[in-house]
Image (cartoon, rainbow, N blue to C red):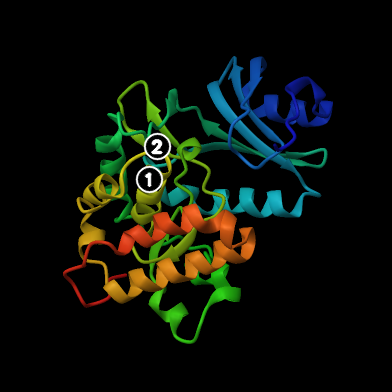
Amino acid sequence: MTERVEWDALPAEFRSAVEARTGPVIASASVTSGFNCTLAMDVRTRNSGRLFLKGVRLSDDAGMAGLLCEERVNSVVGGIGATVRYRVEAAGWLALAFIHIDGRHVDYSPETGDLGAVTRTMQRMQHLRTPAAPVPQLSDRFAGHLRPGEADMLHGTHLLHTDTNPHNILISNHDGHAYLVDWAMPALGPAWVDAAYTATWLMAFGQTPEDALAWLSGIPSWQQADRASVETFVKVTCRHWTARMGEKDAAGSNAEFRHLLDTPRPRAIRQT
């Protein structure tokens, strides 16, 4: 589990810099789930209301890379992700203060009533514009597992989140919308990729492959997905997890990804 730092344990200079933007912090509570960062907390402030404060030490290279990615794409994910309200850098720390989303983690179980909201968010994501700042291609993270021609099959221009695990999707208590948070690993690729990842999470949380694929079939970009590109995505992902975890430990996850190939796709033209 990632180390968490409480508000009172942060450097006084950093706390003062935060409060110079937000007004006095009245209460704080660390978030224990998700978020690969040292500072992750809900804060109640006198002038700015409730915020989610996410930060890392400047010396944390991996944490900084993820947080800067979130900052770069935030301007184009409004209404789908949480909006950054403030940026604070002081005393060896960098933090982003997001507008707080009052909600709960999505339920992916067979009894869920959340999939309508998830579907609507996935459909809206198809229309996200490409950020002006550089974002890597999805194929870049699989560089050590690609065979000739496979990078081209995964090429795309759509902004992807790439980690739709339930900690990263919040169902709003206010309007029931599904918000996708923690954009620390964005990529560019085919429009259907995040929906495909989500279908594998549905299987991981007890949905049958048939039910997960039935949900996936309602996503327009999946309906138009090029079969060869999907096959490449599945093969490369399975190679990645096998190399990372070993064949035995990766077997369950790999089986879920291979189920994505169970239903023939009607289109033969690659869509990005």
> Is 54 in front, or is 271?
271
Query: Number of numbered discs present?
Result: 2
Q: In front: mark 2 or mark 1?
A: 1
Query: Along the horizontal axis of the image, is 124 left or right of 203?
Result: left
Vertical comparison of 160 with 95: above or below: below
Q: Position of residue 139 (x, y in %)?
A: 50, 71
Vertical comparison of 258 with 231: above or below: above
Q: Amino acid at mark 2?
A: Tyr
Q: Which mark is residue 175?
A: none
Mark 2 or mark 1, earlier in chain: 2
Residue holding disc 2: 179
Number of residues whose C-alpha sits closer than 10 Å to that of mark 2, classed few (under 14), some (14–19) or many (20 or more):
many
Quarter of the figure that contains the C terminus = bottom left
Number of residues whose C-alpha sits closer than 10 Å to that of mark 1, classed few (under 14), some (14–19) or many (20 or more):
many
Q: Would you identify the image quadrant in which residue 26 lies? A: top right
Q: Would you identify the image quadrant in which residue 33 lies? A: top right
Name the residue at 52% across, 62% down. Answer: 133
Does the image show residue 192?
Answer: no
Q: Secondary structure at mark 1?
A: helix
Query: Along the horizontal axis of the image, is 119 left or right of 27?
Result: left
Vertical comparison of 61 with 31: above or below: below
Residue holding disc 1: 203
Does the image show residue 71?
Answer: yes
Name the residue at 49% across, 87% down. Answer: 148
Name the residue at 49% across, 27% down. Answer: 100
Quarter of the figure that contains the N terminus = top right
